[in-house]
Image (tube, rainbow, N blue to C red):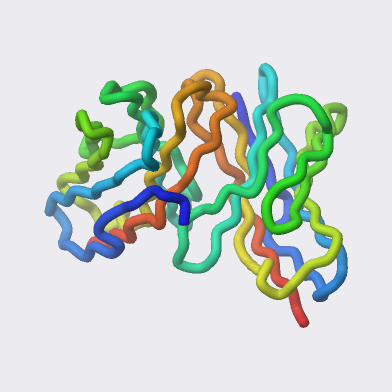
Amino acid sequence: AQSVAQPEDQVNVAEGNPLTVKCTYSVSGNPYLFWYVQYPNRGLQFLLKYITGDNLVKGSYGFEAEFNKSQTSFHLKKPSAIVSDSALYFCAVRDGRSQGNLIFGKGTKLSVKP
Amino acid sequence: DSGVTQTPKHLITATGQRVTLRCSPRSGDLSVYWYQQSLDQGLQFLIQYYNGEERAKGNILERFSAQQFPDLHSELNLSSLELGDSALYFCASSVGTSEFTDTQYFGPGTRLTVL
Protein backbone atom coordinates (compact mmCIF):
# COMPACT_ATOMS: atom_id res chain seq x y z
CA ALA A 1 0.00 0.00 0.00
CA GLN A 2 1.11 3.55 -0.72
CA SER A 3 2.05 5.59 2.33
CA VAL A 4 4.05 8.56 3.51
CA ALA A 5 5.63 9.17 6.89
CA GLN A 6 6.57 12.46 8.45
CA PRO A 7 8.68 11.41 11.41
CA GLU A 8 8.67 14.78 13.19
CA ASP A 9 5.53 16.25 14.72
CA GLN A 10 7.27 19.59 15.17
CA VAL A 11 10.38 21.31 13.84
CA ASN A 12 11.77 24.43 15.49
CA VAL A 13 14.11 26.73 13.58
CA ALA A 14 15.61 30.13 14.21
CA GLU A 15 14.88 32.81 11.62
CA GLY A 16 17.63 32.96 9.02
CA ASN A 17 18.68 29.34 9.54
CA PRO A 18 18.09 26.60 6.98
CA LEU A 19 15.09 24.36 7.54
CA THR A 20 14.33 20.76 6.65
CA VAL A 21 11.00 18.98 7.01
CA LYS A 22 11.36 15.24 6.51
CA CYS A 23 9.20 12.86 4.51
CA THR A 24 9.66 9.23 3.54
CA TYR A 25 7.42 7.28 1.23
CA SER A 26 6.44 3.78 0.27
CA VAL A 27 4.94 3.07 -3.15
CA SER A 28 4.62 0.05 -5.36
CA GLY A 29 5.19 1.89 -8.63
CA ASN A 30 6.50 5.28 -9.67
CA PRO A 31 6.34 7.84 -6.86
CA TYR A 32 4.41 11.03 -7.45
CA LEU A 33 5.14 13.22 -4.44
CA PHE A 34 3.73 16.54 -3.27
CA TRP A 35 4.23 19.10 -0.52
CA TYR A 36 1.43 21.31 0.77
CA VAL A 37 1.37 23.96 3.51
CA GLN A 38 -1.59 24.81 5.74
CA TYR A 39 -1.79 28.09 7.61
CA PRO A 40 -4.19 28.38 10.58
CA ASN A 41 -7.83 28.36 9.49
CA ARG A 42 -6.83 28.13 5.83
CA GLY A 43 -6.90 25.51 3.13
CA LEU A 44 -3.90 23.62 1.85
CA GLN A 45 -1.59 25.51 -0.48
CA PHE A 46 0.46 23.66 -3.06
CA LEU A 47 4.22 24.13 -2.72
CA LEU A 48 5.85 21.71 -5.15
CA LYS A 49 5.75 18.26 -6.66
CA TYR A 50 8.06 15.56 -7.98
CA ILE A 51 6.90 13.62 -11.00
CA THR A 52 10.09 12.71 -12.81
CA GLY A 53 13.41 14.25 -13.81
CA ASP A 54 15.69 16.34 -11.61
CA ASN A 55 15.93 15.17 -8.04
CA LEU A 56 15.92 18.76 -6.78
CA VAL A 57 12.50 20.34 -7.23
CA LYS A 58 11.98 24.05 -6.76
CA GLY A 59 8.66 25.40 -5.60
CA SER A 60 6.83 28.39 -4.21
CA TYR A 61 8.05 30.83 -1.55
CA GLY A 62 11.68 29.74 -1.87
CA PHE A 63 11.04 26.12 -0.90
CA GLU A 64 12.66 23.17 -2.60
CA ALA A 65 12.59 19.43 -2.09
CA GLU A 66 15.12 16.72 -2.71
CA PHE A 67 13.95 13.39 -4.07
CA ASN A 68 16.13 10.46 -3.05
CA LYS A 69 15.05 7.17 -4.56
CA SER A 70 17.51 4.98 -2.66
CA GLN A 71 16.41 6.41 0.68
CA THR A 72 12.74 6.74 -0.43
CA SER A 73 12.74 10.27 0.89
CA PHE A 74 11.39 13.60 -0.27
CA HIS A 75 12.55 16.19 2.26
CA LEU A 76 11.38 19.79 2.07
CA LYS A 77 14.06 22.45 2.45
CA LYS A 78 14.57 26.18 2.53
CA PRO A 79 17.97 27.88 2.78
CA SER A 80 16.84 30.67 5.11
CA ALA A 81 13.68 30.44 7.20
CA ILE A 82 11.43 33.40 7.94
CA VAL A 83 8.85 33.77 10.71
CA SER A 84 5.95 33.62 8.26
CA ASP A 85 7.02 30.11 7.20
CA SER A 86 5.52 28.91 10.50
CA ALA A 87 2.69 26.59 9.52
CA LEU A 88 1.68 22.95 9.15
CA TYR A 89 3.39 21.10 6.31
CA PHE A 90 2.04 17.99 4.64
CA CYS A 91 3.80 15.52 2.41
CA ALA A 92 1.56 13.49 0.08
CA VAL A 93 1.86 10.66 -2.41
CA ARG A 94 -0.42 9.73 -5.25
CA ASP A 95 -2.29 6.47 -4.83
CA GLY A 96 -2.13 4.76 -8.19
CA ARG A 97 -4.79 2.23 -7.22
CA SER A 98 -7.43 4.86 -6.63
CA GLN A 99 -6.75 6.85 -9.73
CA GLY A 100 -5.17 9.90 -8.35
CA ASN A 101 -6.28 10.76 -4.86
CA LEU A 102 -3.58 11.95 -2.47
CA ILE A 103 -2.44 10.06 0.59
CA PHE A 104 -1.18 12.49 3.20
CA GLY A 105 1.29 12.24 6.01
CA LYS A 106 0.16 13.35 9.44
CA GLY A 107 1.81 16.75 9.05
CA THR A 108 4.76 18.55 10.62
CA LYS A 109 4.32 21.79 12.49
CA LEU A 110 7.11 24.22 11.63
CA SER A 111 7.86 26.98 14.10
CA VAL A 112 10.29 29.72 13.09
CA LYS A 113 11.41 31.95 15.96
CA PRO A 114 12.82 35.47 15.49
CA ASP B 1 -6.29 32.16 -3.53
CA SER B 2 -6.47 28.76 -5.23
CA GLY B 3 -9.58 29.54 -7.26
CA VAL B 4 -11.55 26.76 -5.55
CA THR B 5 -14.50 28.03 -3.54
CA GLN B 6 -16.40 26.27 -0.79
CA THR B 7 -19.56 27.23 1.04
CA PRO B 8 -20.41 27.59 3.81
CA LYS B 9 -17.22 28.32 5.74
CA HIS B 10 -18.73 27.17 9.00
CA LEU B 11 -21.66 24.91 9.77
CA ILE B 12 -23.03 24.07 13.19
CA THR B 13 -25.74 21.47 13.44
CA ALA B 14 -27.16 18.79 15.70
CA THR B 15 -26.76 15.04 15.72
CA GLY B 16 -29.11 13.25 13.36
CA GLN B 17 -29.34 16.16 10.97
CA ARG B 18 -28.36 16.38 7.29
CA VAL B 19 -26.15 19.02 5.69
CA THR B 20 -24.88 19.85 2.21
CA LEU B 21 -21.45 21.24 1.48
CA ARG B 22 -20.82 22.95 -1.82
CA CYS B 23 -17.69 23.27 -3.92
CA SER B 24 -16.91 25.17 -7.12
CA PRO B 25 -13.72 24.01 -8.82
CA ARG B 26 -11.20 26.22 -10.58
CA SER B 27 -12.26 27.32 -14.02
CA GLY B 28 -11.50 24.55 -16.50
CA ASP B 29 -10.89 21.83 -13.92
CA LEU B 30 -12.88 18.64 -14.50
CA SER B 31 -11.87 16.62 -11.43
CA VAL B 32 -13.17 17.30 -7.96
CA TYR B 33 -11.95 15.56 -4.81
CA TRP B 34 -13.38 15.64 -1.29
CA TYR B 35 -11.20 15.19 1.79
CA GLN B 36 -11.93 15.15 5.51
CA GLN B 37 -9.47 16.54 8.04
CA SER B 38 -9.87 15.59 11.69
CA LEU B 39 -7.50 15.55 14.64
CA ASP B 40 -7.58 11.78 15.06
CA GLN B 41 -7.73 10.66 11.42
CA GLY B 42 -5.70 13.38 9.74
CA LEU B 43 -6.42 14.16 6.09
CA GLN B 44 -8.43 11.40 4.43
CA PHE B 45 -9.73 11.06 0.90
CA LEU B 46 -13.47 10.61 0.62
CA ILE B 47 -14.51 10.61 -3.03
CA GLN B 48 -13.57 11.85 -6.51
CA TYR B 49 -15.66 12.96 -9.46
CA TYR B 50 -14.51 13.56 -12.99
CA ASN B 51 -16.73 15.47 -15.40
CA GLY B 52 -19.89 14.43 -13.60
CA GLU B 53 -19.02 10.79 -13.02
CA GLU B 54 -17.83 9.16 -9.82
CA ARG B 55 -14.22 8.09 -10.37
CA ALA B 56 -12.91 6.80 -7.05
CA LYS B 57 -14.04 6.22 -3.49
CA GLY B 58 -12.00 6.33 -0.34
CA ASN B 59 -13.02 6.08 3.29
CA ILE B 60 -16.46 7.52 2.75
CA LEU B 61 -19.25 6.44 5.06
CA GLU B 62 -22.52 5.16 3.63
CA ARG B 63 -24.24 8.10 5.32
CA PHE B 64 -22.25 10.40 3.06
CA SER B 65 -22.83 10.95 -0.64
CA ALA B 66 -21.69 13.35 -3.30
CA GLN B 67 -22.41 14.42 -6.83
CA GLN B 68 -20.95 16.64 -9.52
CA PHE B 69 -23.33 18.69 -11.62
CA PRO B 70 -23.16 19.60 -15.32
CA ASP B 71 -21.63 22.98 -14.44
CA LEU B 72 -18.93 20.96 -12.61
CA HIS B 73 -19.68 22.21 -9.12
CA SER B 74 -19.94 19.46 -6.54
CA GLU B 75 -21.93 18.85 -3.39
CA LEU B 76 -21.13 16.59 -0.46
CA ASN B 77 -24.17 15.43 1.49
CA LEU B 78 -23.73 14.26 5.06
CA SER B 79 -26.74 12.67 6.77
CA SER B 80 -27.61 11.18 10.17
CA LEU B 81 -24.77 13.24 11.55
CA GLU B 82 -22.82 12.02 14.55
CA LEU B 83 -20.49 13.88 16.89
CA GLY B 84 -17.54 12.17 15.22
CA ASP B 85 -18.39 13.76 11.89
CA SER B 86 -17.17 17.11 13.21
CA ALA B 87 -14.22 17.97 11.00
CA LEU B 88 -12.86 20.23 8.31
CA TYR B 89 -14.05 19.18 4.87
CA PHE B 90 -11.93 20.17 1.90
CA CYS B 91 -12.68 20.17 -1.76
CA ALA B 92 -9.85 20.08 -4.28
CA SER B 93 -9.87 20.30 -8.04
CA SER B 94 -7.48 19.44 -10.83
CA VAL B 95 -7.45 19.72 -14.58
CA GLY B 96 -8.06 16.01 -15.06
CA THR B 97 -5.55 15.55 -17.86
CA SER B 98 -3.43 13.13 -15.86
CA GLU B 99 -4.69 12.02 -12.50
CA PHE B 100 -1.25 11.01 -11.34
CA THR B 101 0.68 14.14 -12.21
CA ASP B 102 -1.96 16.87 -12.05
CA THR B 103 -1.74 19.23 -9.11
CA GLN B 104 -4.75 19.32 -6.83
CA TYR B 105 -5.73 22.80 -5.66
CA PHE B 106 -7.60 23.02 -2.41
CA GLY B 107 -10.45 25.23 -1.31
CA PRO B 108 -10.53 26.96 2.08
CA GLY B 109 -12.67 24.21 3.60
CA THR B 110 -15.95 23.96 5.48
CA ARG B 111 -15.70 23.49 9.22
CA LEU B 112 -18.53 21.26 10.40
CA THR B 113 -19.42 21.13 14.07
CA VAL B 114 -21.98 18.56 15.19
CA LEU B 115 -23.44 19.23 18.66
Where B41 sits versus A114, above or below?
above
Residue A12 image-quadrant placement: bottom right
Q: Which image quarter is the C terminus of chain A in? A: bottom right
Count of numbered badges drawn on the protein: 0
Residue B113's place in the image compared with A64, above or below, is below
Picture coordinates of residue A57, whole percent (x, y)? 77, 40
**Residue located 82% across and 41% down the image:** A66
> Foreground: B78 or A18?
A18
Q: Does residue A3 sit above or below A84 in this rendering?
A: above
Is residue A8 or residue A37 the one in the foreground? Answer: A37
Quadrant holding the N terminus of chain A: top right
Q: Is residue B94 left or right of residue B76?
A: right
Residue drawn where x is 68% and y is 67% of the image = A85
The residue most toward the bottom is A114
Left or right relative to A103: residue B106? left
**Residue B7 placement (x, y as % from top left):** 26, 56
State the residue lying farthest toward the left.
Answer: B17
Q: Nearer the viewer, residue B52 or A38?
A: B52
Which residue occupies the foreground of this view, B38 or B21? B21
Residue at 47%, 48% in the rendered image: B41
Q: Left or right: where does residue B85 sit relative to residue A57?
A: left
Q: Residue at x 65, y 63 (%)?
A: A109
In the image, A8: left or right of B46? right
Q: Taking B7 as reference, is B74 above or below it?
A: above
Point out residue B93 in the picture as x, y percentages from the top left corner: 42, 38
